[in-house]
């Protein structure tokens, strides 16, 4: 969490995550904006779908680590359009 280390509340979780939602969503930093980061950095390395899928995989792994039930975990087959 290097780009977001200033946001760490001390246990690896972002201090702006409240009730499982971003409490500063409209003002969140660039690193949290998937489309901006894709255009700025990752489009050189991935297609948009590949980049979304890699983000979904990270998200799912975090959900598994947190013990989220399977039915509440992100589905890797549901790419945003
Ligand atoms: S999206 Fe919001 S809650 Fe998630 S890491 Fe970024 S600032 Fe924190």
Image: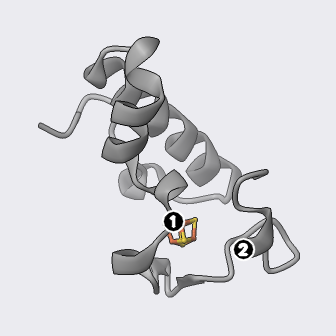
Looking at the image, residue 17 lies above or below residue 78: below
Q: Is mark 1 within 8 Å of ligand 1?
A: yes
Going by the image, does 15 lie left or right of 10?
left
Q: Are marks 1 and 2 in contact (CB under 8 Å)?
A: yes
* Residue occupying image coordinates x 52% and y 46%: 59
Mark 1 and mark 2 lie on one chain; the one further toward the N terminus is 2
Residue 23 is situated, as x and y percent measured from the top left of the image, at 46, 86
Label 1: how many Cα within 10 Å (few below 14, some 14–19, many 20+): few
Quadrant of residue 18 within the rendered picture? bottom right
Q: Nearer the viewer, residue 37 or 68?
A: 37
Q: Nearer the viewer, residue 52 or 38?
A: 38
| Vertical relation: 21 (above or below) 34 | below
Q: Residue at x 31, y 15 (%)?
A: 47
User: x%, y% of residue 21?
Assistant: 44, 78
Q: Quadrant of ligand 1?
A: bottom right
- Which residue is denoted by mark 1 in the rendering? 29
The residue labelled by disc 2 is 7
**Few, some or many residues within 10 Å of mark 2 (<14, 14–19, 20+):** some
Q: Secondary structure at mark 1?
A: loop
């Amino acid at each position: 969490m290097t780009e977001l280390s200033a946001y760490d509340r001390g246990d690896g979780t972002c201090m702006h995550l409240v009730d499982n939602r971003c409490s500063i969503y409209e003002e969140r930093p660039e690193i949290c904006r998937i489309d901006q980061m894709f255009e700025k950095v990752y489009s050189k390395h991935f297609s948009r779908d590949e980049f979304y899928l890699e983000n979904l995989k990270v998200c799912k792994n975090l959900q598994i680590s947190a013990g989220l039930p399977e039915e509440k975990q992100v589905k890797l087959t549901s790419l945003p359009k």
